[in-house]
Amino acid sequence: MTESFRLRVREVVRETPDACSVVFDSPGFDYRPGQFLTLRIPSDRCGSVARCYSLSSSPHTDTFPQVTVKRTVDGYGSNWICDSVTAGDELESLPPAGIFTPSSLDENLLLFAAGSGITPVMSIVKSALASGGGRVVLVYANRDERSVIFARELTELAGRHPARLVVHHWLESVQGLPTAAALAELARPHAAYEAFVCGPAPYMTAVRSALSTLDVPRGRVHVERFKSLGANPFEKAVPVAASSRTASVKVTLDGTEHRFDWPAETKLLDLLLARGLDAPYSCREGACSACSCRLVSGEVKMLNNDVLEEEDLADGIRLACQSLPVTDEVEISYE
């Protein structure tokens, strides 16, 4: 399994009454704008649980990495972090993961965020302004003024980059819930931009509908979804099971081809980890897309999928942590 490491908390910053940023001492890892960390949260019921939190810091502007966490009703991890974590504490983490990141910071970017969905988007905003050359348009929805995370920082960034950054704040207390029609009008002048969307499901649905009416290609719309994890990726990988049927799989990872026998009851990720490959993953239950790979040939069956949409599946994207072989020969690529 991918090795976990410990992060020392440098400080905790209260962003809003129900959100805080946890700043860590420099850990020596690299990450890309929009990625997340999976943290181990102590539990008096089962020892620990795992939760994914986006990095709101930028690898291009911030010395110290940070995640930003918003308290949710009955949210075990978010409430524990907001109530209990202080400077000097240590948290166990998996390496940064996630594909919610621009392929080029020089692209013109159209960013949609709602509530704590601003967390990975903020990392992208800061990175694009510091190291890219394109324009950035942000549509940020919140319940009211008090709930706007990074309000001052966004104002300062817009002031420093008036020709490149435009921020549209949408407040439910003033404008009501954002509709697809209203979002489409905000997005219309920027429909050719690369789009990134993160927030509660109803907001993301409205944004996707808005972009669809503007004929924005599916391949230029990137969506980030998270849900609480049931499994614990900090636990050891499940041993490769014996099977009455075995397929053959060819995997290209980091430019190297590998061939393995693939027992029919063993998930692809478990097989790769057991064979010593450093395959990417985080949640291990089909909820975060960190283990996404491309099916080049053959067919697999996914046991669970909470993140990939029909367009992704049509493009050959599969979740390694949920994939079992269907055909006798399968080819997978992480390139």
Image: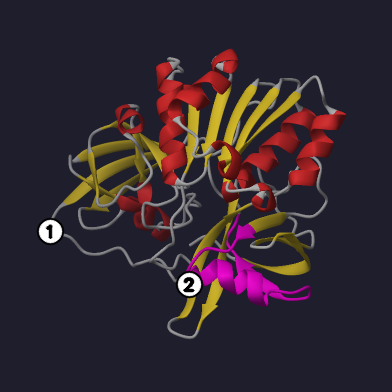
Which numbered disc, 1 or 2, marks the residue closer to the eye? 2
Q: Which residues are magenta?
A: 69-95
Q: Which residue is at the front of the view, 143 or 161?
A: 143
Q: Is residue 90 magenta?
A: yes
Residue 219, placed above or below residue 101: above
Q: Secondary structure at mark 2?
A: strand
Tell me which corner region of the image, top left, top right, bottom left or bottom right, holds residue 92: bottom right
Q: Is residue 21 magenta?
A: no
Task: List x then y, in percent, for residue 149.
Answer: 69, 50
Residue drawn at (42%, 15%), measured in percent from left and top?
215
Q: Is residue 34 visible?
A: no
Task: List x then y, in percent, for residue 166.
Answer: 72, 26
Residue extending furthest right? 160
* Residue indicated by mark 2: 49
* Residue indicated by mark 1: 244
Q: Tell whether 317 sits left or right of 233.
A: left
Residue 44, placed above or below residue 218: below
Q: Is residue 255 visible?
A: yes
Task: List x then y, in percent, for residue 42.
Answer: 54, 78
